[in-house]
Amino acid sequence: MTQSDAPIFEVNAVSQEYQLGSSLFRRRYLRAVDDVSLQLRRGEVLGLVGESGCGKTTLAKIMMGLIQPTAGEVRLNGKRLADVPRLEVASRIQYVFQDPYSALNPRHSVGRIIEQPLRIHGVGAAADRAQKARKLLDVVGLPQRLIDSPPSQLSGGQRQRVVIARALALRPDILVCDEPTSALDVSVQSQILNLLLDLRSEFGLSYIFVSHNLAVVEHMATSVAVMYLGRIVEHAATADIFGNPQHPYTRALLHSVLAPDPGAGIPDLGLGRTVPNPAQLPTGCRFHPRCPVAVPVCSTKEPARGRGERWAECHLVEGSASAAA
Amino acid sequence: MSTADTLLDVRGLRVDIPTPNGMLHAVRGIDFDLKRGETLCLVGESGCGKSLTAMALMGLLPRKALRTADRLEFQGNDILSLPEKAFNRLRGNRMAMIFQEPMTSLNPALTIGQQLVDVHRQHRNVSTKEARERALFLFEKIGVSAPVERLKQYPHELSGGLRQRMMIAMALMCGPQLLLADEPTTALDVTIQAELLRVLRNLQEEFGMGMILITHDLGVVSRMADKVAVMYAGEIVERGDVYQVFNRPSHPYTRGLLECLPIPGRHKHMAHLPSIPGVVPSLIGDLTGCAFRERCQYAEDRCGEADIDWRQLPDGQGYQCILPASSDGVASEVSR
Ligand SMILES: Nc1ncnc2c1ncn2[C@@H]1O[C@H](COP(=O)(O)OP(=O)(O)OP(=O)(O)O)[C@@H](O)[C@H]1O
Ligand SMILES: Nc1ncnc2c1ncn2[C@@H]1O[C@H](COP(=O)(O)OP(=O)(O)OP(=O)(O)O)[C@@H](O)[C@H]1O
Ligand code: SF4
Ligand code: SF4
Ligand SMILES: [Mg+2]
Ligand SMILES: [Mg+2]
C-alpha cells in the first residue's frame, strides 16, 4: 500500500461549539472541538483516541458533514465538503457506527439494508441493486442465506458486517469508523479488524478509526491523533506514538492499557481526581489540572498549537513549536 | 461449600425464556459462589447469558423469563422463595446492579439529582439534603466534574461516559454488600476506566463489598478478578482463580479468547489477528454434547454424542471438555 502525498481529506481549523441552556444574563457554550486540523492520505489509517467526551464523535460527525462546524472547513479531495453534492460525498466517505444494534432498521431485511444507500441516491435499477447487495455479502463474509433475514436474527459480529457492507455500497474511499468493535466480543472483534484490513488492501480504503482501545489502534493505525478536551494534543506516526510518546497525556494513556496480566492490578496514572469539564476549559494548557509534570507556566500560557506531521502541544516538549518560541 | 464468609451461593441456576420458536435456554444450570470482598468475573461471548445471570440474581428478569435453581442464597438466606416485598428491600440496597445499558436504569424524565435522592430515601431514613450530600460524596469518589450542576441535569444531557458514572453512583448510593456490575466501564475511555476500577476496588476493600463483574475486556478481568468463570452458550465452561484461568487455560474456548487479543509484539502491525471462526449455536431447544464443537479445532465425534463431564482439578480449577488439562508449557505460550 502506497500513500500518495496529496491529502484526500482535510479538516482545517475546525471548531464546534454547543450552546448550553441560555439564561437571561449569559449564554454558555461548550467548545467540543477546538481549532482542529488533520489530514488523511490515501491508504492511511488515522487512529483517533481520547477521553470520553473529548469530542471524538463530534469531530467524526463534522468529517461526515453531519454537523456543520461553527468554524473551519472540511475538504474532500481539495473541495469544500459543503460545496460537494450529497451523492458525491456519500460515495467518497461513509460512517460505520459504534453500535451495530441500533444502527440497523429492525423491520428491514439484510438485503434491503445493504442496498439502502443505492436506493436513496437512485443508483442502478432494482435488479442491479439486489445483485450488488449479494456481492457485498460476499465481500464482508456473510452467508448469502442471510439476505432476507431481519437484523434480529443476526449476531453482533454479523450485524457489524452488515453495517460495513452498507457503508461500502457506494464504494467510498474513506470510512469513518466510530468505535467499530467496542460492542463486539474479542473473538469477533478480530474478525472485523481482519475484514477492515483486507478491505484496505483490496480497495485502497482509508480509515479514520475512532477507538478508546489503544491496543486495537496500535495494531490498525498508520498514524495516531490523541485528542484532549477538543484539541489534538499529540499527533505522530503510530510507531512514534507508542514507542516514543511526547505528551504527558499520551504517556498516561499508554500507561492505562491493561494487557492481560493477572495480579498486576490497576495502575495509578497519576492524573488525580480532577476530571476534565469541557464546559469550563482550564486556562493555559488544558491538561494542566491533571498533568503529573506540570510547571508554573502551564496554568497561564497555552502551549503553541501543533501543525505538520508530528507535534505535541506541551511546554516541556523539546522542539515543539512552543519550546522553540 | 458455604461458610460464614459466603455472600452468594448459586447451584444449578437456569433461565428459560419462551419464544415463538420454542423455549430458549439462556442459562443452563450454572454453579458459582462468592465470598465477602471477593470479585468474580464473568466473561464470554455476547449472548452467552452473563446479563441474564446477573438479572436472575437481582430478580429483574424480563417478564416471561423463568428462573429456577437448586440453590440461590444471599448471605445464607434463600432468595428463591423470598416474597416480592422482602426482595424489594434487598434490591438497590444490600444488592445493587450497574446495568450494561445506562438508559435502562436512568429515568429520562427526572434529573440525576432526583433519581439519586429517590433511590437513597427509598431504603434509608434520610433527608433530601443528606441524600444529596451522599450523591456529591460519590461524585467526588468516581470523578464527576461540576458535581452540583450535574444533579440538575437530565440523563440525555450527559455524555455516554458521564451517564455510566451516574449509574455507578446510583448503584453505590446505599452502600451495597453485593455489587453486580455489568460492563460498567465499557463505554469509558481508558484513563477514566482505570480510575473507576480503582475506585470500585477501594470501595470493595473499604466495605467488604462482593462484586460480580461482567466484562468483555480480558485485560480488566486479569487485573480485577479473584475468580473467573468463562461462559459459553449459557454454561460455565471453565472456572478457576485468575492465575489458573489466564496462565493455564484448559478449555479450547478460553484459550481462543486469550489468543484473539491484539498484543503488540505478539502480532505484527496490521497482520491478521487470530479469531474464533463461526458463531454461537442457537439456545432454543436442547443442546446435546459440547456447545462449542462447531468452532473447536479439537472436536471429535464423541464431543457431540453425550453431555461433556465437568473436570475438576485438585487445585480448584475446573472445565468442561474431553481434553486433558493443559500443561504449564501450553499455558505460557498462550499468555505471552
Ligand atoms: N448536542 C449537544 N449539545 C450539547 N453538548 C453536546 C452535544 N453533543 C455533544 N455534546 C458535548 O460535547 C462534548 C463532546 O462530545 P462527543 O460525543 O463528541 O465526545 P466523545 O469523545 O465522542 O465521547 P464518548 O467517548 O463519551 O463517546 C461532550 O462534553 C458532550 O457532552
Ligand atoms: N427478553 C428476552 N427475550 C428473549 N430472549 C432474550 C431476552 N433477553 C435475552 N435473551 C437471550 O438470552 C441470551 C442471553 O442473553 P444475555 O443478555 O444474558 O447475554 P450476555 O451474555 O449478557 O450478552 P452481551 O455480552 O451481548 O451483553 C441471548 O441469546 C439473548 O438473545
Ligand atoms: S504544557 Fe504543562 S501541563 Fe500541559 S502537558 Fe505539558 S507539562 Fe503538562
Ligand atoms: S469437548 Fe470437544 S468440542 Fe468441546 S471444547 Fe472440548 S474438544 Fe472441543
Ligand atoms: Mg463518542
Ligand atoms: Mg449482557
Image (tube, rainbow, N blue to C red):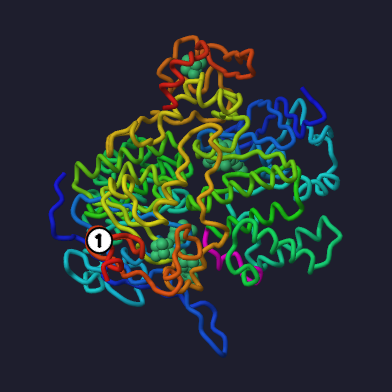
Choose between B216 and B18: the one closer to the eye: B216
Which residue sits at x=59%, y=54%?
Answer: B102
What's the magenta region? B151-160
Return the x and y of residue B320 as percentages of the image width and height.
57, 18
Residue type at mark 1 is Gly
Q: Position of residue B271 (x, y in %)?
A: 27, 35
Rendering quarter of residue B225: top right
Residue A210 image position (x, y, % from top left):
37, 53
Where, by quadrant of the figure, is residue A36 drawn?
bottom left
The C terminus of chain A, quarter of image: bottom left
Residue placed most toward the observer, B293 or A133? B293
Front in this rendered view, residue A251 or B137: A251
- Dot 1: within a 10 Å radius of its alpha carbon, few (fewer than 14), some, or many (20 or more) residues? few
Q: Name the residue under label 1.
A: A122
Residue at (50% x, 23% y) in the render: B247
Q: Is residue A72 above or below residue B75?
A: below
Q: Seen in the image, is B19 located left or right of residue B327?
A: right
Q: In this view, does B111 lie to the left or right of A80?
A: right
Instruction: For mark 1, name the chain.
Output: A
